Image (cartoon, grey):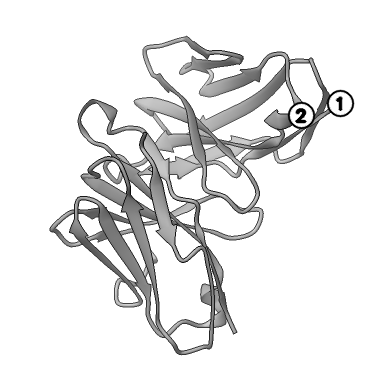
């Protein structure tokens, strides 16, 4: 149980285009989803926290107009990188929390590798 | 500022030995601490959670200790196997609800 999927697993795009990444909890309802970014040999850095039906909370230094997050249902959150540039190339990972007694534990998706040319 | 430190150098051990990884933190009073495993190009996988009022927790060949005085957690893998080779991440609760702050991780290589 507690499986999280991400789509696509990798994407290559031209500079200036927008890219949408989907994160789904497959067998549970996720009250909260998180988006992280990881650069090579670095730790996961939290970008934003997303609760279903409300606006995402962004971490300091993360541009909310550039990284659009939509948490439309209890099983789906999307991250859209708008007007992507080469410096946005990274490994984007989402996670989901079941809530209730298990809210501290997060289940991570397999990640999406983005390369902006 | 809050800081989480894990051994940056890779840990190489022989199969069958016990691997011990360290996580130190500063400027934190975490309610709990978690350990995750991450394989190359993959998302982290949850292993264990230990709360501030717990000293030790075990799960199969894994053991975690939590010393809130030393501000340190130790992660042990007994009878290590080559399949245990991965990067192990320490994570603490952040100020953002149940979001996590991660250390950089320690790479473990278990050789036959």
Question: Which part of the image, by quadrant, shows the N terminus of chain B?
Answer: top left
Quadrant placement of the C terminus of chain B: top right
Residue under the image location 61 percent in, 54 percent down: B41
- Label number found at residue B98: none
Horizontal side, residue B85 vs residue A71: left or right:
right
Q: Is residue B40 above or below residue B15?
A: below
> Which residue is the site of mark 2?
B82
B24 relative position to A17: left or right? right
Nearest the viewer among B2 and A59 is A59
A72 up-or-down from B14: above or below: below
Residue highlighted by disc 1: B112
Helix, strand or loop for disc 1: loop
- Spot the residue most to the left: A53
Q: Residues within 10 Å of mark 2 (few under 14, many from 20)?
A: some
Q: Chain of mark 1?
A: B
Q: Compared with residue B82, is residue A49 higher up or lower down, i.e. above or below?
A: below
């Amino acid at each position: 149980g507690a499986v999280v999927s991400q789509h696509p697993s990798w994407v290559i795009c031209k500079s200036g285009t927008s890219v949408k990444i989907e994160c789904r909890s497959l067998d549970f309802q996720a009250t909260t989803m998180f988006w992280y970014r990881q650069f090579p040999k670095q730790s996961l850095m939290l970008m934003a926290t997303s609760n279903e039906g409300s606006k995402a909370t962004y971490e300091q230094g993360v541009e909310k107009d550039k990284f659009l997050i939509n948490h439309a249902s209890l099983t789906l959150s999307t991250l859209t990188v708008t007007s992507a540039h080469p410096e946005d190339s990274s490994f984007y990972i989402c996670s989901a929390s079941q809530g209730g007694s298990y809210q501290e534990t997060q289940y991570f998706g397999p990640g999406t590798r983005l390369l902006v040319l | 500022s809050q800081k989480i430190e894990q051994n940056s150098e890779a840990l190489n051990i022989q199969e069958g030995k016990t691997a011990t990884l360290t996580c130190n933190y500063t400027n934190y009073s975490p309610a709990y601490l978690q350990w995750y495993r991450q394989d190359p190009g993959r998302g982290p996988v949850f292993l264990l959670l230990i709360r501030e009022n717990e000293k030790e927790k075990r799960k199969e060949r894994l053991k975690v200790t939590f010393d809130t005085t030393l501000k340190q957690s130790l992660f042990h893998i007994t009878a290590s196997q080559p399949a245990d080779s991965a990067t192990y991440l320490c994570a603490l609760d952040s100020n953002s609800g149940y979001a996590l702050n991660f250390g950089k991780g320690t790479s473990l290589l278990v050789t036959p």
